[in-house]
Amino acid sequence: MQRAASPPPVYYSAPSPPESPVQRGRLWRLLGWVSIAMSVVLVGGSLTAYGFWRRLDGQIHRENVRDKLGAHRPAKLNDSINILLMGSDSRQGANAQYGTEQGERSDTTILLHISPGGAGAIGISFPRDSMVQMPSCKKSNGTTVPAQFGMINAAFSNAGPSCTWRTIESLTKIHIDHFVEVDFAGFKQVVDALGGVEICVPKPINDPKAELHLKAGKQVVHGAEALGYVRTRYVLGDGSDLDRIKRQQAFMASVVKKATDKGMLTDPGRTYSFLSATTKSIKADDQLTLSVMEKLASGLKGMSAGKVRFVTVPTMAYPKDKNRVQFNQALAEPLFQAIREDNTPPEPAPTPVPAQQKVQPVPPAQVRIGVFNGTSEHGLAQRTADQLTERGFKVVKVGTVKSSARTRILYGAGAERQAARAAIAVPGHPPEAWAKAKPGYVYLIIGKDGAKLSGGGPAVPKVAGEIRADRDVCAQT
């Protein structure tokens, strides 16, 4: 996950690096992920003592889809969890008031990735207008839909959740663990159970088609009004699906912020109402069992809104149709790779200090560090600096030095504890004092032996336009 979640590093005055060897060198359906992710967070944190697990679990409609996924699936490489979230525009039952269209579609699909240990979560939106190659899919009646090229949302129409599951796995090579589906009525119930969700609109809205009438500015919307807000397309933005996805992501961010609010977590009645509405509103695979949800809850307990972000798969114009897009593989593949290989746990606690070692590491936020590339690999220093910034370090400078045979962590007077923290993040390189260093500063010189951050796997890159759940509601609309 080039990253937009964290602000770019602020560069402070610092001396030049050493040279080598000190080398002088359509739709609101995106809410679906909240239906499971926030459920397990809240249950894990608030309801264990009330013994409501089984009652809530019994309200979820489950479906067996494993036999439709095929034998040649991506391998599961780590302990992260990937949940495919889909929205159904079915007009059956309580959804009949929204029209009489035949069949079901999923206009927007999200892959919710939860890092190992609950270090963070990211929801990746797949625009419905994306032109992709879809694999053959088995329908519930036993017939097979042949492989085809078309809009990504056709997969759901062709053979339901299992076909979308197969399609996303084939496009990303990411192993998906579970799916969750939600519909119109479910969306309204969840929003109402939260007591409404805060939004911000740049101008007054009057959209009779969506039955939406809003004043300008910050406000709280409830069920039907919230549904109208995320469904409207032409009275806000440029009318494109990509623009609507951005608005839906901002709405989801507000849902996460509301669901993780302390007032919500400390009110068992409100929490149970929210969870009950959620579990009644979703369909899931039959292996998303009670024990799996409890395990997930334990891993996510304590996750804050600031650790949740939403992005859209990078796309580019589809040459044969200006109303369609295709994946920008040069930007999308690094995102997919980082998700596949995400082994990064939360920033480790300082290791016990041996009796003979008196240096106690400080928190990353107290480390002012310069990152310098001593190799021929273009952009290595900046990528490493981005990863350190993501982990809370204060990157003060990014640059290059002459070729360095090995990676070194150097520090100035008074920065021994800061260097110790840097050595935790970039293990295998014992800190060294440097007389020419500016007091209080640390220098990471990346040599030919590399500088892999602890936890393994590439850091999830920034994606242009991503939205964090803790942002001000009027900051991105």
Image (cartoon, rainbow, N blue to C red):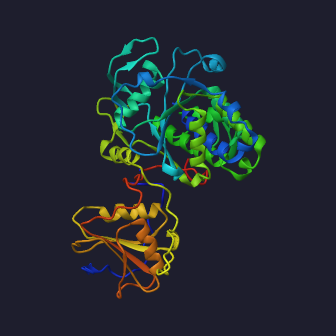
Q: Is residue 137 above or below residue 45?
A: above
* Residue appearing at x 63%, y 40% in the figure: 39
Q: Nearer the viewer, residue 3 or 206?
A: 3
Q: Position of residue 459 (x, y in %)?
A: 40, 54
Q: Position of residue 11 (x, y in %)?
A: 42, 72
Q: Quadrant of residue 288?
A: top right
Q: Nearer the viewer, residue 83 or 242?
A: 83
The answer to whether 328 appears left or right of 4 in the picture is left
The answer to whether 168 appears left or right of 302 in the picture is left
**Residue 117 in view of the camera:** yes
Q: Residue furthest front?
A: 355
* Residue appearing at x 51%, y 16% in the figure: 103
* Residue appearing at x 58%, y 46% in the figure: 253
Q: Nearer the viewer, residue 186 or 241?
A: 186
Q: Position of residue 304 (x, y in %)?
A: 60, 53
**Residue 222 in view of the camera:** no
